[in-house]
């Protein structure tokens, strides 16, 4: 009897925590919402000015035909891939500790993908001609491949987020009652798709989620490989590389897992989710991030070694400006702050605390954005004739759009979790039914034992 009462209380507490952002977003929600919204609005103003004036207001010129927008495109889509893959792989391996973090990882994947895909249009000088990709596509163009891959991946990511939501939407439909307004009740009824929790429905849902988890992995690899090929199939020093495909994929995973750590920590703190997301979750994610960071370090060394040792004068000049030239400060900032420090913080026993692991994630995310700048800008400004390098100007328009896009990710997640539960109730209840630990401490101990 006592155990049943405690289990009932735990279930009620879990439900209250999952729906907390929908009912009680907290006193800092609206001030933060306004600040992030202002940054997004400034970005919209900057883009409008760019449409009227041309790409030159974003720093583009004859000697720098690529700039910060292309780096943003790769960076934001990359973190989306990491978020989706974390959820997909953990589902396929049936990692029990995944349940409290999968909803946030999947939400981050969708929002960051929408932001990243926007830069595929923003960086075009004539965005009104985007319709030509539909009416007269050129099969030999990597831009067409990008459009098809990103669109397909976007649909798959949306489905991957929605399917596990169905039982939770049914719970909201049946339990929220008077606390939900009429529009919310209609939304929950439609989103629940007639879910009643029958054995047949459960089998169908589990099969569908498993199938999407399998499908999302090759789709995500394809998207980031296509982005890489858009660079590497260009006969330009610094881009024409055979390892760009896996190089981009590993970089996306590294930065994506890092951002998952940051997002989970932020919402955990904001909505008091500590009883369900313990230190063990962050330790597990940090170890995954560390492995990916070590692999990315190997790819970076391999790329620089082969380019400097055997390549042409043009390739060697790219390496030179990275290691000791005008781009060296940015490169070594990335190496130290974006790779070595996050690896140390992730693996050292003394820094096995949430705040240090979140710092490691933040450094990795910022460092990988710098790396995307280093991949994009030096080759785009390298001289093909003569020795005069081009120059890149970071104008207020480019900075505003970058800050606005960055702000759009937490803003989008804040809006998303105002409508859907932040914790995957159905999954967490299934895990508990299979014998998962009850408390955050027990969950952390269990994860540590597995690792």
Image: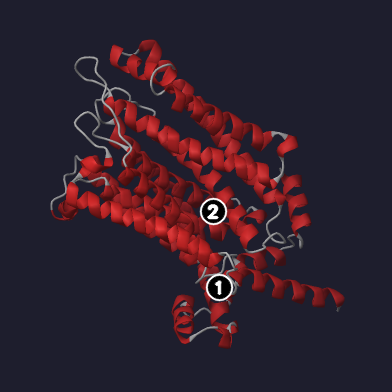
Q: Is residue 146 visible?
A: yes
Q: Which mark is residue 22?
A: 1
Which x, y percent locates residue 273? 67, 62
| For residue 405, above or below residue 188 | above
Q: Which residue is mark 2?
A: 87
Q: Is residue 148 shown left or right of residue 35?
A: left
In this orientation, which residue lies closer to the viewer: 36 or 165?
36
Q: Which residue does the image show at 38% across and 21% down from the upper left?
A: 326
Q: Is residue 185 left or right of residue 145?
A: right
* Residue nearest the viewer, comparing 305 with 71: 71
Outermost residue to the right:
2
Up-down relation of residue 379 to residue 60 (above or below)? above
Q: Is residue 311 above or below residue 382?
A: above
Label 2 Cα crowd, 10 Å radius (few <14 / some 14-19 / many 20+): many
Left or right, 230 with respect to 39, comes to left
Quadrant of the image for the C terminus?
A: top right
Could you tell which of marks 1 and 2 lies nearer the N-terminus? 1
User: In the displayed image of the protein, which residue is found farthest to the left?
Assistant: 136
Residue sitting at x 27%, y 38%: 59
Marking on residue 362: none
């Amino acid at each position: 009897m006592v155990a049943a009462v405690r289990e009932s209380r735990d279930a009620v507490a879990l439900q209250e925590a999952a729906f907390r952002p929908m009912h009680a977003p907290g006193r800092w929600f609206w001030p933060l919402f306004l600040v992030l919204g202002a940054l997004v609005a400034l970005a919209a103003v900057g883009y409008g000015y760019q449409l009227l004036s041309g790409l030159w207001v974003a720093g583009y010129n004859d000697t720098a035909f690529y700039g910060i927008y292309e780096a943003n495109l790769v960076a934001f889509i990359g973190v989306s891939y990491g978020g989706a893959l974390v959820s997909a792989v953990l589902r396929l391996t049936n990692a029990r500790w995944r349940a409290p973090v999968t909803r946030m990882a999947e939400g981050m994947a969708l929002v960051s993908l929408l932001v990243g895909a926007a830069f595929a249009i923003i960086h075009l000088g004539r965005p009104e001609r985007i319709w030509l990709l539909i009416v007269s596509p050129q099969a030999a163009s990597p831009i067409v491949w990008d459009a098809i891959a990103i669109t397909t991946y976007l649909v798959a990511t949306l489905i991957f987020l929605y399917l596990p939501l169905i039982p939770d939407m049914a719970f909201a439909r049946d339990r929220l009652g008077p606390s939900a307004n009429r529009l919310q009740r209609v939304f929950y009824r439609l989103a629940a798709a007639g879910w009643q929790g029958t054995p047949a429905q459960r089998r169908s849902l589990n099969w569908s989620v498993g199938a999407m988890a399998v499908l999302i992995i090759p789709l995500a690899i394809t998207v980031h490989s296509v982005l890489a090929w858009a660079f590497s199939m260009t006969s330009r020093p610094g881009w024409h590389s055979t390892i760009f495909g896996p190089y981009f994929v590993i970089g996306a995973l590294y930065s994506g897992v890092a951002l998952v750590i940051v997002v989970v920590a932020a919402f955990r703190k904001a909505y008091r989710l500590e009883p369900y997301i313990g230190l063990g979750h962050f330790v597990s994610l940090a170890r995954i991030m560390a492995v990916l960071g070590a692999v990315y370090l190997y790819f970076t060394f391999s790329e620089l070694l082969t380019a400097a040792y055997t390549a042409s004068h043009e390739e060697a000049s790219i390496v030179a400006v990275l290691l000791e030239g005008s781009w060296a400060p940015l490169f070594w900032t990335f190496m130290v702050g974006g790779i070595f420090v996050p690896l140390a913080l992730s693996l050292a026993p003394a820094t096995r605390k949430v705040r240090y692991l979140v710092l490691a994630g933040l450094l990795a995310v910022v460092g990988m954005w710098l790396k995307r700048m280093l991949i994009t800008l030096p080759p785009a400004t390298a001289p093909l004739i003569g020795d005069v390098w081009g120059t890149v100007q970071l104008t207020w328009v480019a900075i505003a759009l970058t800050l606005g896009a960055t702000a759009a990710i937490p803003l989008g997640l804040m809006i998303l979790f105002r409508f859907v539960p932040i914790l995957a109730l159905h999954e967490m209840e299934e895990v508990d039914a299979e014998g998962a630990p009850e408390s955050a401490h027990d969950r952390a101990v269990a994860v540590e034992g597995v690792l």
